[in-house]
Amino acid sequence: MSLSQLKQGCKTPLLRRMLEFKVYKRKIQGYNVTRTTLRHRWIKRLPVFSSGVQTISTQSDKDAIDLSKFPVERIRNFSIIAHIDHGKSTLADRLLEITGAIVKTERNKQVLDKLQVEQERGITVKAQTASVFYTHQGQQYLLNLIDTPGHVDFSYEVSRSISACQGVLLIVDANQGIQAQTVANFYLAFEAQLTIIPVINKIDLKNADPERVEAQIEKVFDIPREECIRISAKLGTNVERVLQEIVERLPPPTASRDDSFKALVFDSDFSHYRGVVANVAVFGGQVRKGDRIVSAYLGKSYEVNELGLLRPHEHPTDRLYAGQVGYMVAGMKDVKEAQIGDTLYHQQHPVDALPGFKPAKAMVFAGIYPMDQSEYTGLRSAIDKLTLNDSSVTVQKDSSLALGAGWRLGFLGLLHMEVFNQRLEQEYNANVVVTAPTVPYKAEHGSEEITIVNPAQFPDRSVVSQYLEPMVNGTILAPDSYIGKIMTLCLNRRATQENMVYIDDHRVMMKYIFPLNEIVVDFYDLLKSMSSGYASFDYENAGYQAADLIKMDILLNGKSVEELTMIVHRQRAYNVGKAMCERLKDSIPRQMFEIAVQAAIGSKVIARETIKPFRKNVLAKCYGGDITRKMKLLKRQAEGKKKMRRIGNIDVPKDAFINVLKRTEK
Ligand SMILES: Nc1nc2c(ncn2[C@@H]2O[C@H](COP(=O)(O)OP(=O)(O)OP(=O)(O)O)[C@@H](O)[C@H]2O)c(=O)[nH]1
């Protein structure tokens, strides 16, 4: 809805002016404008309008959205998948523009990356759906596209998205060629038996070499090179052809309108006002507003309050039919009610549940605690709501002597964890302490086995027959000139090489088995920097392996810092401990007394650094007697201290806990 349409809904000139002011203020701050950002109680009653994206006029929308006109044969559901930064969101923009869903403007960039964190980081973290209409050879088609993230941490989003599709566009950068996530995403689509259309993007680049990339696609994926479409998503070159090929090459869904209603919940969002907004793919029959539906998972029934298409913003419709993809609000208020992978059906016509998904497997665990225990309840509700938007996060209550009551959260990777924390801070104003991330280790004693996700609960060797650590199959793609450096890095990380093949004259694909712990924090960054950005990396679970593990404590003036306690391999303990002490020394600001930073195994100190005392007198440069200036300086100093965590009498910046883990290989 446009601003002028919204203004027509404002009864008084004052209200109109306030609306303009609020919208303007949010826009210049670069925020999306939604109802939640409009605090005024009158304005809150207005309908939600677009997040700064100009959509096509509502009149033409009304004409277009008679969903009953679209027989299943004229529906195409597809995901856009690729390695990170190969241009998925840019292609999605062009497809939305050509089909008239958005207006081409400077501001309408990566419109499907709606979250603030996505816009700030320039990456997609959450898959987004958009339904568009496209006329081909005189017939109108309904295309449902899902833009997916490229980073390995979010591959769960990709596998969920493709469950609602019959085909994918596999985008490959014409300069970089096939990368690690291209391979991983190809296999996800291939195993789901989807039709794959390879699209070579960025052909406008000076160094683009589409012939080489086509040859790679033929060699690695066994797809004939003639099937590749060369495009520039940025300039729009050949994008129209992508739409034609979608219609011609992708099969329609096999769902039938005559069957009983059956829908798969493949994603969900949480709205403060409406509760759960589920993204659904209808696999049979139809559903109307007011229908009573049942969740197969919980067996609870709900009334459908609202449903519609995402174009890409919510566009309410009266019904959704078999083969279509859309959203549904059905009064689900509790986080646990909207299970991803759940099947919905009509109360009068029960059906067998759809296969659903394997639950996401958390690879990295960290403790999250409120900075101040008085913020516990607020943080609990923020975590509840955010996990509804991101069901791959696992939550378990936890508590510690030093940090009080909190939670141990499981994530799919470190970027996932950083994004989750950033969203907690940005979307819920939470102020949290995060402990050092750890992978899920296991300990065996006789036939018993326990999983350890908190280093503080690491059992003593005397009660354990063996420790086990999680392993992953890693794939690295890189130019062959970096083979030597990459092999050394992998060796330092206790990896075992499995094989190495050339995918063209100069690029190799290397397969390794890594201990997960060795790659989780900083491996990808190091690999990137040592290969001048040319290497890429992806990994998947490879079970557990016995390992010689020990618990290492970090002490500040003799007091253990629980946030930094970690489980390490005995062979690496000295190097890791030494590097941690050195980095902590750089991260902790000098204070009025000397600080000893030590790494210890049991009572044995294995590394030590000293932070020299220093008195920061913020008033030193403030000559004369201007009291307001002095007060300002002292206030700023006090605010800086709020971002610190006090351990004993030492102030530690709270981001130091994660930053010190990022090793730099010597
Ligand atoms: N020169 C050129 N640049 C492009 C083209 N397509 C995309 N880009 C640029 O490549 C960068 C990444 O594009 P995105 O569309 O964000 O890539 P993505 O695959 O969605 O990225 P993630 O969602 O983070 O995986 C942006 O800076 C785009 O402007 C193209 O055809 N030509």
Image: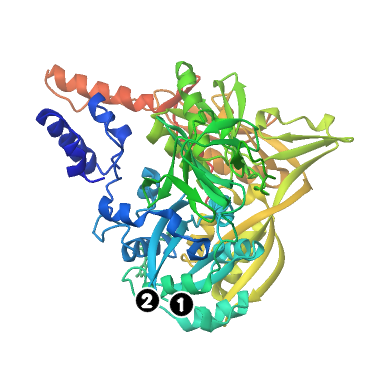
Quadrant hosting residue 422 = top left
Please provide percent x and percent y for residue 631: 20, 19
Quadrant hosting residue 552 = top right
Q: Amino acid at mark 1?
A: Ile
Q: CA distance from mark 2 to mark 1?
A: 8 Å
Name the residue that disc number 1 marks: 229
In the figure, is residue 39 to the left or right of 89?
left
Name the residue nearer the viewer: 323 or 391.
323
Q: Amino acid at mark 2?
A: Asn
Q: Residue at x 59, y 55 (%)?
A: 163
Name the residue nearer the viewer: 552 or 376.
376
Please provide percent x and percent y for residue 35: 30, 34
User: Where is 378 relative to 264, above or below?
Assistant: above
Identify the mark at residue 107; answer none if there is no mark.
none
In the figure, is residue 540 to the left or right of 98?
right
Q: Are marks 2 and 1 in contact (CB under 8 Å)?
A: yes
Q: Secondary structure at mark 1?
A: strand
Name the residue that disc number 2 marks: 238
